[in-house]
Amino acid sequence: MNQAFAGTETLARPIDYLAVTFFSITVLAALIGVPIFGLTHGYTGLDWTLFGILYAVTGLGITVGYHRLISHRSFACPEAVKVAFLIAGGWAFQNSALKWSADHVRHHAKVDQEEDPYNATKGFWYSHVLWLMLKDPYADDKYTAQFKKDRLVVWQDKYYLPILASGFILPFLAGLVHGGWMSGLSCFLLAGVGRAFLVLNSTFCINSICHMWGDQPNGTDNSSRDSWWISLITFGEGYHNYHHAYPRDYRNGPKWYNFDPSKWLIFGLSSLGLAANLCRVSPKTN
């Protein structure tokens, strides 16, 4: 199969028009609205500062919060810290932690099989984004059941839409206070829409690129691969072959020199007494 395209049997699945609508609006705003506004009005230092801050906050909300804390229980933390990660992850525009984690756990359980939500054997574009545009016939409550026992995860799922909206409203309000309506629009476009688009696509690269190109030093029984350069844009998530071999490890990059800001943040929180029970499962790393 051509690695770029999904098979016709996949594309025959019903289209999720709500997902298509939201993603299309985001793509058009990010690829057309953001650059046009930049060319005609320019972006301020505040816009770029908030863009960088929110890229890091929302990206780590996914990698540390949704992924390593909720999905894999790689560490434990106080409820206040968990709430902060759930809010930050909600701002990333990647669905609630309940839905995200259920999909991710199913990905590990059924990797490269038909039930895998972002099955890379169906091609780059399917695993990168098309899987979101099609209704999922394999969704199973057994993958959500464990997360429904967590009252904070259930809380975030219930209030996901207002949490998501606040991630776009806050940069607008910051710009509005700083310089009026045009400044608010400027900050909303760059630190809201543009930031969300890039965080989405950096995360999508784990599902696509890290299952197609890279090294497999920890096993070849599935398509997962390590890609150090993807780690540069995903806060350490690019060491994906290691992650599939040892999914509960709080480190995706296990070596001290691996670029993995997510593990550094988790370790830093543990040093402050804000994280505990850090899981290290690989016998081959230090």
Image (cartoon, rainbow, N blue to C red):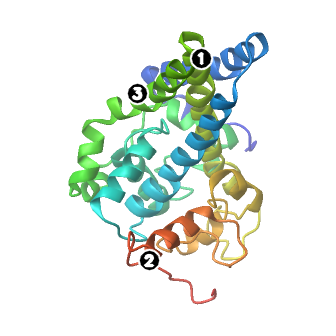
Q: Which residue does the numbered mark 1 point to in the structure image?
A: 183
Against 87, is 145 above or below?
A: below
Query: Distance between the Cα atoms at labels 3 and 2?
Result: 32 Å
**Mark 1: secondary structure:** helix
- Mark linked to residue 278: 2
Screen quadrant of the N terminus: top right
Q: Is residue 250 or residue 173 the one in the foreground?
A: 173
Query: Distance between the Cα atoms at labels 1 and 3?
Result: 19 Å
Q: Which residue does the numbered mark 3 point to in the structure image?
A: 165
Query: Distance between the Cα atoms at labels 2 and 1?
Result: 43 Å
Rendered location of residue 74, percent (x, y): 43, 70
Against 136, is 220 above or below?
A: below
Residue type at tag 3: Ala
In this view of the protein, can residue 15 be seen by the observer?
no
Residue 89 lies in what quarter of the image?
A: top left
**Mark 3: secondary structure:** helix
Rendered location of residue 260, percent (x, y): 64, 65
Residue occupying the point 43% across, 53% down: 66
Q: Is residue 269 or residue 7 the one in the foreground?
A: 269
- Classify mark 2: residues with Cα within 10 Å, few (<14), some (14-19) or many (20+): many
**Mark 2: secondary structure:** loop
Against 109, is 16 above or below?
A: above
Q: Is residue 49 or residue 201 the one in the foreground?
A: 49
Against 237, is 166 above or below?
A: above
With 119 as the anchor, is 123 left or right in this view?
A: right
Of the image marks 3 and 2, the number of the one nearer the N terminus: 3
